[in-house]
Image: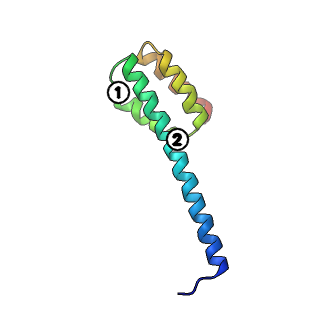
Amino acid sequence: METSPLFDGIREKWIDQGIRQGIQQGIQQGIQDTILDALEENIGRCPESLVNSLRAIRDIDTLKLLHRRAMKAKTIDEFMQALNEAVRNNN
């Protein structure tokens, strides 16, 4: 199969896009894991519903805000309120 400059350009664009998406997903997952670690340290084990809601959030700024809230939360309900507020503000 012959290669063409057009195909090479498209392939490079797709590769770059895939790399960027992978990096973004890695950052998101890293922050999500850090939030869960902070909650488990402060409060104890997190309910699966909280974990699922947190994993659905993709916005980095929202995750950073939730990380700060997780570090200060004294109860799971306190963090859930912050989580629900963040989800409402992003929709």
Q: Is residue 58 visible?
A: yes
Within 10 Å of disc 1 (Cα), the crowding (few <14, some 14-19, many 20+) is few
Q: CA distance from mark 1 to mark 2?
A: 23 Å
Q: Are marks 1 and 2 in contact (CB under 8 Å)?
A: no
Q: Which residue is mark 2?
A: 27
- The residue lying furthest to the bottom in this view is 1
In-image side of 22 versus 43 (left or right): right
Q: Quadrant of residue 90?
A: top right
Is tag 1's residue or tag 2's residue first in the polypeptide sequence? 2
Which of the pair 32/12 is nearer the observer?
A: 12
Taking the spot 52% from the left edge, 38% from the top edge, the residue there is: 57
Residue at the top extreme of this rendering:
74
Vertically, is 76 above or below 1? above
- The x, y position of residue 5, in whole percent, is 66, 79
| SS state under label 2 | helix
Q: Residue at x 46, y 28 (%)?
A: 35
> Is residue 87 shown to the viewer in this render?
no
How many residues crowd around disc 2 within 10 Å: few (fewer than 14), some, or many (20 or more)? some
Asked whether, in this view, residue 77 is left or right of residue 13, the answer is left
In this figure, which residue is indicated by the disc labeled 1? 47
Q: Nearer the viewer, mark 1 or mark 2?
A: 2
Rendering coords of residue 3 (x, y %):
59, 83
Q: Position of residue 63 (x, y in %)?
A: 54, 32
Q: Residue at x 55, y 56 (%)?
A: 19
SS assignment at label 1: loop
In the image, residue 9 above or below residue 49: below
Locate residue 68: give its quadrant.
top right
* Circle 2: residue type: Ile
